[in-house]
Image (cartoon, helix red, strand yellow):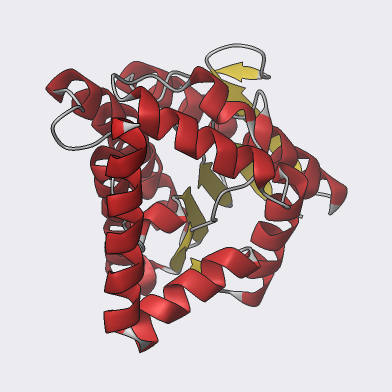
Amino acid sequence: MARVLITGAAGGLGRSLVDAFEARGDDVVGTDLNGAELTLDVTSEADWAAARDHVEQTWGGLDILVNNAGIAGGGRLDHDTIEEWQRLVDINLMGAVRGTKAFVPVFKAQGSGHIVNIASLAGLVHPAGMGSYNATKAAVVALTETTGHELAGFGVRASVVCPSYFRTGLVDHMQGSDRMVGQVIGRLVKDSPWGPDDIARAVIEGIERGDELILPDDAARAAYKLKTTDRPAYDATMRAQARKLEESARD
Protein backbone atom coordinates (compact mmCIF):
# COMPACT_ATOMS: atom_id res chain seq x y z
CA MET A 1 0.00 0.00 0.00
CA ALA A 2 1.46 3.33 -1.11
CA ARG A 3 1.04 6.82 0.29
CA VAL A 4 0.10 9.08 -2.63
CA LEU A 5 -0.34 12.83 -3.10
CA ILE A 6 -2.01 14.05 -6.31
CA THR A 7 -2.33 17.65 -7.46
CA GLY A 8 -5.19 18.94 -9.60
CA ALA A 9 -7.43 16.28 -8.09
CA ALA A 10 -10.80 18.05 -8.04
CA GLY A 11 -11.83 16.74 -11.45
CA GLY A 12 -10.73 15.27 -14.77
CA LEU A 13 -7.66 13.07 -14.81
CA GLY A 14 -6.73 14.07 -11.25
CA ARG A 15 -10.01 12.77 -9.87
CA SER A 16 -9.68 9.58 -11.92
CA LEU A 17 -6.16 9.07 -10.59
CA VAL A 18 -7.40 9.42 -7.01
CA ASP A 19 -10.04 6.76 -7.71
CA ALA A 20 -7.55 4.45 -9.45
CA PHE A 21 -4.98 4.59 -6.64
CA GLU A 22 -7.67 4.11 -3.99
CA ALA A 23 -9.06 1.14 -5.93
CA ARG A 24 -5.76 -0.68 -5.54
CA GLY A 25 -5.75 0.03 -1.79
CA ASP A 26 -3.46 3.04 -1.55
CA ASP A 27 -3.75 5.94 0.90
CA VAL A 28 -4.39 9.03 -1.22
CA VAL A 29 -4.65 12.74 -0.56
CA GLY A 30 -6.03 14.79 -3.43
CA THR A 31 -5.13 18.46 -3.65
CA ASP A 32 -6.45 21.37 -5.69
CA LEU A 33 -7.29 25.05 -5.45
CA ASN A 34 -10.75 24.00 -4.28
CA GLY A 35 -13.01 20.98 -4.30
CA ALA A 36 -10.34 18.56 -3.06
CA GLU A 37 -9.36 17.12 0.31
CA LEU A 38 -6.39 19.46 0.70
CA THR A 39 -6.06 22.98 -0.69
CA LEU A 40 -2.89 23.47 -2.70
CA ASP A 41 -2.02 26.20 -5.19
CA VAL A 42 0.89 24.77 -7.19
CA THR A 43 2.24 28.29 -7.75
CA SER A 44 2.65 28.79 -3.98
CA GLU A 45 5.79 27.52 -2.26
CA ALA A 46 4.03 28.03 1.08
CA ASP A 47 1.20 25.72 0.00
CA TRP A 48 3.73 23.09 -1.07
CA ALA A 49 5.47 23.32 2.29
CA ALA A 50 2.11 22.89 4.02
CA ALA A 51 1.32 19.83 1.87
CA ARG A 52 4.69 18.29 2.77
CA ASP A 53 4.05 18.95 6.46
CA HIS A 54 0.58 17.41 6.15
CA VAL A 55 1.77 14.09 4.71
CA GLU A 56 4.71 13.87 7.10
CA GLN A 57 2.45 14.44 10.10
CA THR A 58 -0.29 12.14 8.77
CA TRP A 59 1.75 9.32 7.25
CA GLY A 60 5.34 9.93 8.26
CA GLY A 61 6.39 10.25 4.62
CA LEU A 62 5.24 9.82 1.02
CA ASP A 63 5.69 7.11 -1.59
CA ILE A 64 4.28 8.66 -4.77
CA LEU A 65 3.97 12.32 -5.73
CA VAL A 66 1.80 12.90 -8.81
CA ASN A 67 2.28 16.36 -10.32
CA ASN A 68 -0.92 16.41 -12.32
CA ALA A 69 -2.16 20.01 -12.02
CA GLY A 70 -2.00 21.96 -15.26
CA ILE A 71 -3.88 24.21 -17.65
CA ALA A 72 -4.63 24.08 -21.35
CA GLY A 73 -3.34 26.82 -23.58
CA GLY A 74 -1.41 27.67 -26.68
CA GLY A 75 -1.67 29.65 -29.86
CA ARG A 76 0.22 30.52 -33.01
CA LEU A 77 3.49 32.28 -32.34
CA ASP A 78 2.24 35.66 -33.53
CA HIS A 79 -0.97 35.41 -31.49
CA ASP A 80 0.10 33.89 -28.16
CA THR A 81 1.00 36.70 -25.76
CA ILE A 82 3.94 36.79 -23.36
CA GLU A 83 1.44 36.87 -20.48
CA GLU A 84 -0.14 33.66 -21.78
CA TRP A 85 3.29 32.05 -22.07
CA GLN A 86 4.14 33.09 -18.51
CA ARG A 87 0.91 31.65 -17.08
CA LEU A 88 1.55 28.27 -18.72
CA VAL A 89 5.16 28.23 -17.54
CA ASP A 90 4.21 29.13 -13.97
CA ILE A 91 1.58 26.41 -13.64
CA ASN A 92 2.49 23.60 -16.04
CA LEU A 93 6.25 23.66 -15.55
CA MET A 94 6.99 25.49 -12.31
CA GLY A 95 4.14 23.70 -10.52
CA ALA A 96 5.98 20.42 -11.12
CA VAL A 97 9.30 22.04 -10.22
CA ARG A 98 7.95 23.35 -6.91
CA GLY A 99 6.41 19.99 -6.06
CA THR A 100 9.61 18.15 -6.88
CA LYS A 101 11.73 20.53 -4.79
CA ALA A 102 9.30 20.28 -1.87
CA PHE A 103 9.46 16.48 -1.69
CA VAL A 104 12.97 15.58 -2.83
CA PRO A 105 14.33 16.03 0.73
CA VAL A 106 11.62 13.68 2.02
CA PHE A 107 12.40 11.04 -0.59
CA LYS A 108 16.15 11.31 -0.06
CA ALA A 109 15.79 10.97 3.68
CA GLN A 110 13.64 7.85 3.47
CA GLY A 111 15.66 6.34 0.60
CA SER A 112 12.63 5.74 -1.59
CA GLY A 113 9.90 7.47 -3.54
CA HIS A 114 8.42 7.95 -6.98
CA ILE A 115 7.71 11.26 -8.75
CA VAL A 116 5.12 10.97 -11.51
CA ASN A 117 4.76 14.04 -13.72
CA ILE A 118 1.72 14.32 -15.97
CA ALA A 119 2.96 15.98 -19.13
CA SER A 120 1.36 15.44 -22.55
CA LEU A 121 2.11 13.99 -25.94
CA ALA A 122 2.81 17.67 -26.70
CA GLY A 123 5.99 17.20 -24.67
CA LEU A 124 7.28 14.75 -27.29
CA VAL A 125 5.42 15.68 -30.48
CA HIS A 126 5.10 19.37 -31.27
CA PRO A 127 2.20 20.46 -33.51
CA ALA A 128 1.84 23.98 -34.85
CA GLY A 129 -0.25 26.47 -32.93
CA MET A 130 0.79 25.14 -29.54
CA GLY A 131 4.27 26.55 -29.02
CA SER A 132 3.81 27.64 -25.41
CA TYR A 133 2.00 24.47 -24.35
CA ASN A 134 4.50 22.28 -26.22
CA ALA A 135 7.41 24.07 -24.58
CA THR A 136 6.10 23.66 -21.03
CA LYS A 137 5.29 20.00 -21.51
CA ALA A 138 8.64 19.29 -23.18
CA ALA A 139 10.28 20.96 -20.19
CA VAL A 140 8.34 18.64 -17.86
CA VAL A 141 9.66 15.66 -19.83
CA ALA A 142 13.22 17.00 -19.43
CA LEU A 143 12.67 17.71 -15.73
CA THR A 144 11.46 14.15 -15.18
CA GLU A 145 14.41 12.56 -16.95
CA THR A 146 16.83 14.71 -14.98
CA THR A 147 15.06 13.83 -11.75
CA GLY A 148 15.32 10.13 -12.50
CA HIS A 149 19.05 10.34 -13.17
CA GLU A 150 19.81 12.59 -10.20
CA LEU A 151 17.83 10.63 -7.62
CA ALA A 152 18.40 7.05 -8.76
CA GLY A 153 21.24 6.69 -6.28
CA PHE A 154 18.80 7.52 -3.47
CA GLY A 155 16.28 4.85 -4.45
CA VAL A 156 13.91 7.39 -6.01
CA ARG A 157 12.25 6.87 -9.40
CA ALA A 158 10.68 9.33 -11.83
CA SER A 159 8.10 8.76 -14.56
CA VAL A 160 6.50 11.10 -17.08
CA VAL A 161 3.05 10.51 -18.57
CA CYS A 162 2.40 11.74 -22.12
CA PRO A 163 -1.20 11.15 -23.22
CA SER A 164 -2.68 12.25 -26.51
CA TYR A 165 -6.02 14.08 -26.56
CA PHE A 166 -8.58 12.60 -24.18
CA ARG A 167 -11.98 13.78 -23.03
CA THR A 168 -11.51 16.24 -20.19
CA GLY A 169 -13.03 19.48 -18.99
CA LEU A 170 -9.60 21.12 -19.05
CA VAL A 171 -10.24 22.76 -22.41
CA ASP A 172 -13.48 24.28 -21.11
CA HIS A 173 -11.31 26.66 -19.09
CA MET A 174 -8.70 27.22 -21.78
CA GLN A 175 -7.61 30.82 -22.04
CA GLY A 176 -5.82 32.40 -24.96
CA SER A 177 -6.07 35.04 -27.63
CA ASP A 178 -5.84 32.56 -30.53
CA ARG A 179 -9.43 31.36 -30.68
CA MET A 180 -8.82 29.24 -33.78
CA VAL A 181 -6.39 26.98 -31.94
CA GLY A 182 -8.80 26.67 -29.03
CA GLN A 183 -11.54 25.51 -31.38
CA VAL A 184 -9.30 22.92 -33.03
CA ILE A 185 -8.14 21.50 -29.70
CA GLY A 186 -11.71 21.46 -28.41
CA ARG A 187 -12.84 19.31 -31.34
CA LEU A 188 -9.94 16.88 -30.92
CA VAL A 189 -10.68 16.49 -27.22
CA LYS A 190 -14.41 16.01 -27.80
CA ASP A 191 -13.86 13.38 -30.50
CA SER A 192 -11.28 11.35 -28.56
CA PRO A 193 -12.23 7.74 -27.79
CA TRP A 194 -10.43 7.94 -24.43
CA GLY A 195 -11.65 9.38 -21.15
CA PRO A 196 -9.78 10.22 -17.95
CA ASP A 197 -10.54 6.83 -16.38
CA ASP A 198 -8.82 5.11 -19.32
CA ILE A 199 -5.73 7.27 -18.93
CA ALA A 200 -5.65 6.79 -15.15
CA ARG A 201 -5.73 3.00 -15.50
CA ALA A 202 -2.87 3.14 -17.98
CA VAL A 203 -0.88 5.36 -15.61
CA ILE A 204 -1.25 2.83 -12.80
CA GLU A 205 -0.18 0.02 -15.13
CA GLY A 206 2.85 2.03 -16.24
CA ILE A 207 3.85 2.75 -12.65
CA GLU A 208 3.53 -0.92 -11.74
CA ARG A 209 5.72 -1.90 -14.73
CA GLY A 210 8.32 0.65 -13.69
CA ASP A 211 8.05 2.65 -16.92
CA GLU A 212 9.93 5.93 -17.04
CA LEU A 213 7.93 7.09 -20.08
CA ILE A 214 4.24 6.23 -19.97
CA LEU A 215 2.37 6.57 -23.28
CA PRO A 216 -1.13 5.65 -22.12
CA ASP A 217 -3.08 5.50 -25.39
CA ASP A 218 -2.74 4.20 -28.95
CA ALA A 219 -2.64 7.65 -30.55
CA ALA A 220 0.24 8.74 -28.33
CA ARG A 221 2.22 5.59 -29.04
CA ALA A 222 1.64 5.87 -32.80
CA ALA A 223 2.62 9.55 -32.98
CA TYR A 224 5.79 9.06 -30.95
CA LYS A 225 6.74 6.01 -33.02
CA LEU A 226 6.32 8.01 -36.23
CA LYS A 227 8.63 10.76 -34.94
CA THR A 228 11.32 8.38 -33.75
CA THR A 229 11.27 5.97 -36.71
CA ASP A 230 10.37 8.14 -39.74
CA ARG A 231 11.31 11.75 -39.13
CA PRO A 232 10.63 12.95 -42.71
CA ALA A 233 7.07 11.59 -42.57
CA TYR A 234 6.60 13.13 -39.13
CA ASP A 235 7.80 16.55 -40.34
CA ALA A 236 5.55 16.36 -43.39
CA THR A 237 2.56 15.54 -41.20
CA MET A 238 3.26 18.39 -38.77
CA ARG A 239 3.77 20.94 -41.57
CA ALA A 240 0.60 19.86 -43.34
CA GLN A 241 -1.24 20.39 -40.07
CA ALA A 242 0.30 23.86 -39.78
CA ARG A 243 -0.85 24.80 -43.30
CA LYS A 244 -4.34 23.54 -42.55
CA LEU A 245 -4.48 25.62 -39.39
CA GLU A 246 -3.54 28.80 -41.28
CA GLU A 247 -6.02 28.04 -44.06
CA SER A 248 -8.79 27.54 -41.50
CA ALA A 249 -7.93 30.86 -39.87
CA ARG A 250 -8.31 32.65 -43.20
CA ASP A 251 -11.73 31.12 -43.96
Horizontal and vertical percent for residue 175?
A: 38, 19
Residue at image position (47%, 30%) is 183
In the image, 195 versus 158, the foreground residue is 195
Residue 187's quadrant in the figure?
A: top right
| Front-most of residues 108 and 44 | 44
* Image vertical order of residue 11 relative to residue 211, above or below: above
Q: How many marks?
A: 0
Q: Is residue 73 visible?
A: no
The residue most toward the top is 34
Report the residue that reaches farthest toward the bottom. 229
Which residue sits at x=28%, y=32%? 250
In this view, the residue farthest toward the front is 251
Q: Nearer the viewer, residue 108 or 38?
A: 38
At x 73%, y 40%, the residue is 16
Residue 104 is situated, as x and y percent measured from the top left of the image, at: 36, 48
Left or right for 84, reference 160 = left
Quarter of the image with the N terminus is bottom right
- Residue shown at the point (52%, 46%) measured from the top left: 65
Question: Closest to the observer: 247 or 49?
Answer: 247
Classify 213 as above or below 118: below
Which percent across, then down, holds residue 10? 66, 23
Quarter the C terminus occupies: top left
- Does residue 36 lie above or below 181 as drawn? above
Residue 229 can be seen in this image: yes
Residue 207 in percent (x, y) is at 62, 65
Q: Is residue 76 left or right of residue 114?
A: left
In the drawing, does residue 137 fall left or right of residue 132? right
